Image (cartoon, rainbow, N blue to C red):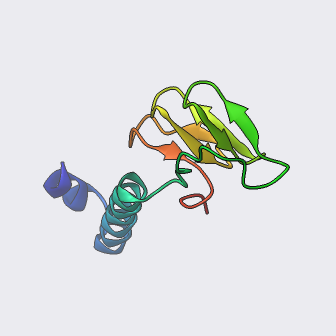
Amino acid sequence: LGFAFSQRYPVPLAIVWYLVAGGCLIFLACTACSDPGIVRREPKRIDRTWTWTSQTSSYRPSKSIYCRDCNCVIEEYDHVCPWTGTAIGKKNMC
């Protein structure tokens, strides 16, 4: 694919394409290996805003949600990325 791409299109365009594709792969790998903001189990309420979660049998902060795919509580949970298989939360969201 790469050799045919560079023969059909001008060399500067092929260089830009390879840089963008490589950057995307690097950023996907960094997202897959980073911590999304997993909240540790807390048997005692830390703050008045913390609520009980029966799935993990612990307290969680107000802006965190239990992720069924990851089996843990994620702070400021957004979604689970299908390409990396990782939850997207507070610590790995741009």
Foreground residue, 11 or 58? 58
In the depicted structure, whether residue 6 falls above or below residue 58: below
In the depicted structure, whether residue 83 falls above or below residue 39: above
Foreground residue, 87 or 74? 74
Residue 17's spot in the image, x, y percent? 36, 63
| Quadrant of the rendered image containing residue 14 | bottom left
Total numbered circles:
0
Foreground residue, 18 or 94? 94
In the current view of this chain or complex, which residue is farthest to the bottom?
A: 12
Residue 26's spot in the image, x, y percent? 34, 63
Residue 71's spot in the image, x, y percent? 46, 31
Name the residue located 40 percent from the left edge and 39 percent from the top edge.
83
Name the residue located 72 percent from the left edge and 55 percent from the top edge.
46
In the current view of this chain or complex, which residue is farthest to the front?
A: 44
Where the C terminus falls, by quadrant? bottom right
Name the residue located 40 percent from the left edge and 64 percent from the top edge.
20
Q: Is residue 61 left or right of residue 11?
A: right
In the depicted structure, whether residue 11 falls above or below residue 77: below
In the current view of this chain or complex, which residue is farthest to the left?
A: 3
Q: Is residue 54 left or right of residue 52?
A: left
Residue 38's spot in the image, x, y percent? 52, 50
Name the residue located 24 percent from the left edge and 54 percent from the top edge.
5
In the depicted structure, whether residue 54 falls above or below residue 80: above
Q: Is residue 61 left or right of residue 22?
A: right
